[in-house]
Structure formats: structure tokens, C-alpha cells
Image (cartoon, grey):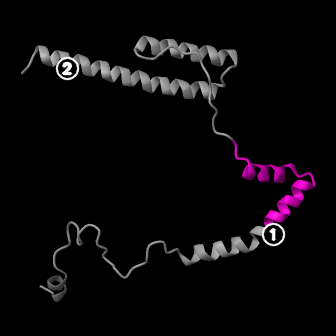
């Protein structure tokens, strides 16, 4: 046998250090950033004011793309809005079906956009699954009480 085989020993298995203990306590401190990222941030911060000034000038000059860039930063697009619907209470599967029907009618009438209707329908589907799960649990419990092992 060679000396290398004796000094290396078997391969380490499992965790060499306990949880929460670093293998390199003198390693990179928390929150430290790579030098390349620091350099990019410095370049960006140096030119940011000039770039912003130029975009504002272009927007004032009628460049609609520059105006869009500014407006998207100042007033971000809304991702949703509250909707008011007359829906039945959803306490059982039949009432969930009736509620889905009212959502379909609202989309067809133009009261809801298709995206809003889809979002409401997804909530109703989650409600239906919850009702179904509760009903199945009650049935299983009743069966187990009737036929204990």
C-alpha cells in the first residue's frame, strides 16, 4: 500500500460539522458582495442622474417611449381591482356551481374582464375543493364509526 492511501483515509460521509457551524468560520461575512457587483453598482450610480435627465428631456420633447418609461416608474400598473358581484353563498357544491354561473354571466355582459373572471373562478374552485374535502372527511368519519376495526 502507498502512503497516500493511508493518509487520505475513507471518504467523509454525512455532515462534517454540526448544524449552524460553518466549515470556514473566517469565510466571507454575511452581506458581503462580489467585487464585480460593487463595480457595476458604482458605474450605474455615477451615470444614473445623467440617464434620468436625458429620459426626462426626451419625454418633454415628445418621445412617447421615454414618457412611458417615466410613467411606469412613477405610477406602476395596477395588478387587479376589487370587483363587486352578486353571488350566492358558497356553502355546498351546488351553490359553487351557481356562483360560477354568475361569474360567467358577468364576463359575458362585460362587467368583468376575462382575466378577472378567471381569477374569481379560481377562488371558487378552491372553495369547491375545500367543501369537497370537508364532505369526504365527514363521510369517512361516519363510515369508521359504523364499522370500527
Magenta-colored stretch includes residue 90: no
Residue 124 or 64: which is nearer the viewer?
Answer: 124
| Dot label at residue 141 | 2
Magenta residue span: 51-77
76 up-or-down from 99: above or below: below
Relative image position of residue 69 (x, y in whole percent):
77, 52
The Cα atoms of the two marked residues, 2 and 1, are separated by: 70 Å
Label 2 packing within 10 angstroms: few (<14), some (14-19), many (20+): few
Quadrant (top left, top right, bottom left, bottom right) of the N terminus: bottom left
Q: Quarter of the image holding residue 94?
A: top left
Taking the image as shown, residue 99 lies to the left or right of residue 38, namely left
Q: Quarter of the image holding residue 101?
A: top right
Residue placed under numbered mark 1 in the picture: 50
Label 1 packing within 10 angstroms: few (<14), some (14-19), many (20+): few
129 up-or-down from 40: above or below: above
Looking at the image, the residue that sits furthest to the left is 149
Residue at disc 1, secondary structure: helix
Relative image position of residue 111 (x, y in whole percent):
68, 20
| Disc 2 versus disc 1: nearer the observer | 2
The residue that appears at 52% across and 74% down in the rendered structure is 33
Amino acid at each position: 500500500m502507498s502512503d497516500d492511501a493511508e493518509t487520505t483515509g475513507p471518504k467523509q460521509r454525512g455532515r462534517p460539522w454540526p448544524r449552524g457551524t460553518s466549515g470556514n468560520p473566517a469565510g466571507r461575512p454575511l452581506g458581503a458582495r462580489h467585487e464585480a457587483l460593487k463595480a457595476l453598482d458604482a458605474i450605474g450610480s455615477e451615470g444614473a442622474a445623467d440617464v434620468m435627465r436625458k429620459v426626462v428631456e426626451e419625454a418633454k420633447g415628445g418621445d412617447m417611449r421615454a414618457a412611458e418609461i417615466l410613467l411606469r416608474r412613477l405610477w406602476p400598473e395596477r395588478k387587479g381591482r376589487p370587483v363587486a358581484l352578486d353571488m350566492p353563498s358558497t356553502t355546498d357544491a351546488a351553490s359553487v356551481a351557481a356562483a360560477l354561473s354568475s361569474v360567467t354571466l358577468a364576463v359575458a355582459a362585460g362587467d368583468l374582464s376575462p382575466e378577472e373572471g378567471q381569477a374569481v373562478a379560481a377562488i371558487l374552485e378552491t372553495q369547491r375543493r375545500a367543501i369537497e374535502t370537508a364532505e369526504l372527511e365527514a363521510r369517512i368519519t361516519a363510515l369508521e364509526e359504523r364499522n370500527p376495526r
